[in-house]
Amino acid sequence: MGHAGKAIRVQKPAQAAAMPSRYGAAASPPAHAVDILCVAMYFARNSTEHRMAPTHENPLSKLELELRRGALVLAVLSQLRSAQYGYSLRQALAQRGMPIEEGTLYPLLRRLEKQGLLASEWRIDDGPPRRYYHLNDAGEALLANLTTVWSDLVATMGGLLKGAEHEPE
């Protein structure tokens, strides 16, 4: 089931390079936004797969896990509008129904920072030094765009699911 040692090539849809005009020219995401999501989703999948691999008897758990992985970057970005250190971020996500393993979160934070979406700083408060992460301007712009994309997706899926309830069998 794992992909350890295998190279995965992610192909983007042709329209991914240019977001539809409804997102506005000023709010259009960086050209690498799709790359960021693809890499983050791939990384999240492969770093949690060995700990959270669903059984073959329960295909629902596998699908639920994949849905959560797909939303992971958006969930993390949404919580970094204000500065947080890793443990507090994990707690905030878990309290809101999106638990995440340390082995997934910290590499994801480093990758998002390297991609120019987060800034971080070390602080010493009442305890050990902690690295606090927060969105920078590029991260704020990406969060705004991904939020719009997510809202559109939720509306579309809501319509599809509602329509599925009323279709004759």
Image (cartoon, rainbow, N blue to C red):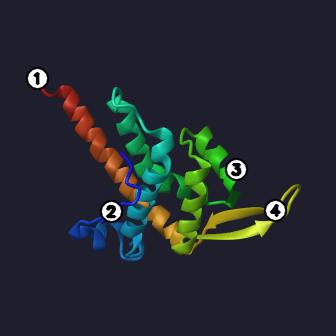
Give the residue pinned by disc 4.
129
Q: Secondary structure at mark 4?
A: loop
For the view shown, which residue lies furthest in the right direction? 126
Q: Are marks 2 and 1 in contact (CB under 8 Å)?
A: no
Residue at position x 10%, y 23% in the image: 169
Three-letter amino acid code at the position of disc 2: Ile
Residue 54 in the image: above or below residue 22: above
Q: Is residue 121 left or right of residue 102?
A: right
Q: CA distance from mark 1 to mark 3?
A: 48 Å
Check residue 88 in the rendering and tell me which mark sits there, or answer none. Answer: 3
Query: Callout 3, which amino acid?
Result: Ser
Q: Nearer the viewer, mark 1 or mark 3?
A: 3
Q: Is residue 46 left or right of residue 158?
A: right
Q: In the rendered image, which residue does mark 2 sit on?
A: 8
Q: Quadrant of residue 155?
A: top left
Residue projecting furthest to the left: 169
Q: Residue furthest top?
A: 169
Whole-percent x, y for residue 133 in the image: 66, 64
Residues 150 and 126: in front is: 126
Which sits earlier in the primary sequence, circle 1 or circle 4? 4
Residue 18 in view = no
- Mark 2 secondary-structure assignment: loop
Residues at marks 1 and 4, CA–CA distance in whole angstroms: 61 Å
Can residue 26 be seen here? yes
Q: Which mark is in front, 3 or 4?
A: 4
Q: Earlier in the sequence, mark 2 or mark 1?
A: 2
Residue occupying the point 27% across, 67% down: 12
Q: Which residue is mark 1?
A: 169
